[in-house]
Image (cartoon, rainbow, N blue to C red):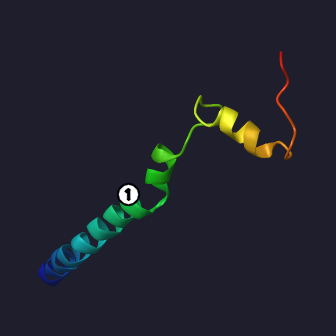
Amino acid sequence: MNLLTEAASGLGALLLPVVAGLLLEELTFGGLVRLFVAPRPGGGKGGEHNQQRNRKKGERRCSH
């Protein structure tokens, strides 16, 4: 029983840095940061710019 406790303790000590490294990698390079940094749909920025880009060349904006 004492051997099992020592083995679990040693395995935990080896796995803790690996798990912490994977968590840090996921937070920095994974999808979680992209969720918080991604632009919100319908936000105020870029709306007019996107409409100008989608218009055909020579087409003008409606005057009203």
Report the residue at 16% width, 79% height from top. 10
Q: How many labels does the image show?
A: 1
- Callout 1 crowding tier (Cα within 10 Å): few <14, some 14–19, many ≥20: few
- Could you tell me residue 30's position as x and y percent? 46, 62
Q: Which of 23 and 62 is in front in this view?
A: 62
| 62 sits left or right of 13 in the view | right
Q: Quadrant of residue 14?
A: bottom left
Secondary structure under the numbered disc 1 in the rendered image:
helix
Q: Residue 4: x, y in percent? A: 20, 80
Q: In this view, does 46 lie above or below 17?
A: above
Q: Pick whichever, 13 or 1, lies toward us.
A: 13
Relative to 27, is 35 on the left or the right? right
Which residue matches tag 1? 27
User: In the rendered image of this protein, does residue 63 appear above or below residue 6?
Assistant: above
Image quadrant occupied by the N terminus: bottom left
Q: Hey, which quadrant is residue 47 in on the image?
A: top right
Q: Which amino acid does label 1 sit on?
A: Leu
**Left or right of residue 17: residue 46:** right
